[in-house]
């Protein structure tokens, strides 16, 4: 007997026409607890990376 019988399934957020084996670039958004700016600040429209932001960028 299946535990949830697909009761809590949601539609996939994946692109149906995209083959994820292809080379490509993706955008990842990360929300931090209490929206703390761990990765840096935007100053005059330019992202100024913190030490942690530099590591994440690499």
Image (cartoon, grey):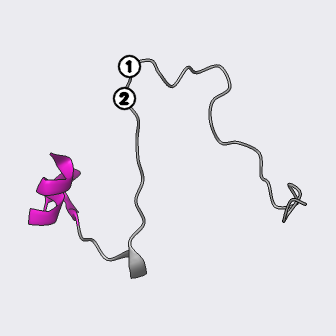
Which residue is farthest front? 1
Q: Residues within 10 Å of mark 2 (few under 14, many from 20)?
A: few
Instruction: Looking at the picture, tell me which residue is in the foreground, 42 or 11.
Output: 11
Instruction: Looking at the picture, tell me which residue is in the foreground, 56 or 37.
Output: 56
In the rendered image, residue 51 lying in the magenta stretch gets the answer: yes
List x then y, in percent, for residue 23.
38, 19
* Residue hosting label 2: 25
- Report, in whole angstroms, how far the alpha carbon at label 2 lies from the one at label 1: 7 Å
In the rendered image, residue 31 lying in the magenta stretch gets the answer: no
Residues rendered magenta in the picture:
39-58
* Residue hosting label 1: 23
List x then y, in percent, for residue 15.
63, 30
| Quarter of the image where the C terminus is located | top left
Q: Residue at x 65, y 42 (%)?
A: 13
37 relative to 54 in the view: left or right? right
Is 10 drawn above or below residue 1 in the view shown?
Answer: above
Which residue is farthest bottom? 34
30 relative to 45 in the view: left or right? right
Q: In which quarter of the image is residue 2?
A: bottom right
Q: How crowded is mark 1: few (under 14 residues within 10 Å), some or many (20 or more)?
A: few
């Amino acid at each position: 007997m299946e535990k949830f019988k697909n009761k809590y399934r949601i539609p996939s957020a994946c692109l149906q026409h995209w083959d994820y084996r292809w080379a490509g670039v993706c955008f990842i958004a990360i929300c931090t607890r209490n929206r703390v700016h761990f990765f840096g600040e935007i100053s005059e429209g330019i992202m100024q990376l913190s030490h942690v932001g530099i590591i994440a960028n690499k």
